[in-house]
Image (tube, grey):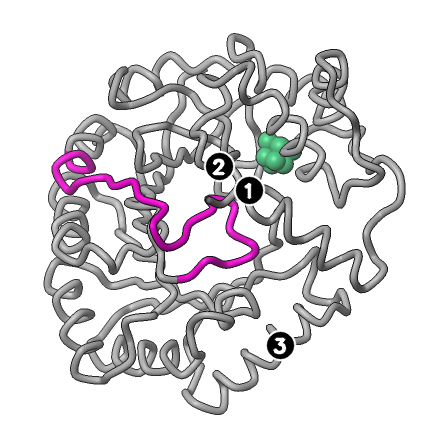
Amino acid sequence: MPISLRGIDFLITYNCPSQCAHCCYRAGPGRGGRLSAAEVTGYLRQVSGHPLEWVMLFGGEPFLYMDDLAAMVAAVRRETAAQPIVFTNAYWAYDEAFATQRLSRLRAAGLDRISLSVDAFHSAYVPVARVALAIRVARALGYAQIDVDNQWIIAPELETPTNAATRRMMDLLAEMVDLTGVHVSNSRTRPVGRAAERLPEILRAVGRMPEGLCEAKGLCIAPYYLGEDLRQPRTVEVFPDGEVNLCAGISLGNARRTPLSQLLAGYDYTKHPVIRMLVTGGPVALLAEAEAAGYARLPGYIDPCHLCYEARRFLHPKQPALLAPAAVYDPDR
Ligand code: SF4
């Protein structure tokens, strides 16, 4: 069944001033990769017939490439009826005049919704005061929607030092800026990418790492922004190397080699060996394939996504086109 997009995410770079422990894209300083404004404009033209509601521009850190970012926001407004959203860690909001200059430039290009990261992971690199300043400036410039995204280990209620630190960061933010009207979203950090290495460490340290194989007998419930159903996804992510992903590291093809419109029109989960396996057997089916190829299972997995990612990481060299980009699987250099 062809994919009819409700949203599309563009990771415009893997570069980021931060190197957060939870990042499924393994973004960080020197990670490289770049989508140009011209390339994003070309992709937007290819999906202009889709019922697009939003276009997310993020990374890595999209504010590293301000000229491109402003041009991309303008292109979303020009080429589609969708709302552009920019997702940032607010590292750039260290000075009111500078923050105002950056956000007013994007506002003039057509941006009226911005999402800001606040949690223990991001706060290790970006002081929460910068997020507070970004909120104040965005509000003064008339941004219609300001979001704050919290990443939680498993769930906000789980008592871990990391989740407690996220709660403290949100309390601090509320002391610094009025959060009335700011939409706060609670995201579960999936143990994919760098998080697959760091979350087990964090959970073992507080004695909560599951013992034995996880209960991943059920099928993959894809994240809400993908449409929760891999048979009929509603969102794709385009990576800095042109890879078109559903879940991070599962590729439908490369839009630099095959037109994006063609990849979407030709989507059929039964023809994609990895997605078919996830839909019909779940992550344990992927584990069985990996074990048949010599993979040694870990003593425990946090959840189905951790199991899925670890099996995929083992299979990645054998199926590099289906399990791409390599940046999601390569350990940090
Ligand atoms: S089970 Fe695998 S494909 Fe499904 S959401 Fe989790 S990591 Fe992604």
Percent of width and height locating residue 18: 42, 61
Q: Does the stretch in magenta take in 249? A: no
User: Which residue is identified by label 2?
Assistant: 328
Which numbered mark, 3 or 1, is in the foreground of this view? 1
- Tag 2 or tag 1, which sits nearer the N-term? 1
Determine the secondary structure under disc 1.
loop
The image quadrant that residue 279 belongs to is top right
Residue matched to label 1: 193
Left or right, residue 22 beside residue 244: right
Label 1 with label 2: CB-CB less than 8 Å: yes
> In screen coordinates, is 157 left or right of 42?
right
Q: Residue at x 19, y 45 (%)?
A: 76
Up-down relation of residue 229 to residue 77 (above or below): above
**Do the residues bearing badges 2 and 3 touch, measured as CB atoms within 8 Å?**
no
| Secondary structure beneath label 2 | helix
Q: From this viewpoint, which residue is outermost toward the front? A: 333
Task: Name the mark nearer the viewer: 2 or 3.
Answer: 2
- Could you tell me the amino acid type at mark 3? Arg
Please report whichever mark, 2 or 3, sits nearer to the chain's N-terminal start. Answer: 3
Magenta segment's dominant SS is: loop
Residue carrying label 3:
167
Residue 203 lies, in percent from the top left, at 76, 57
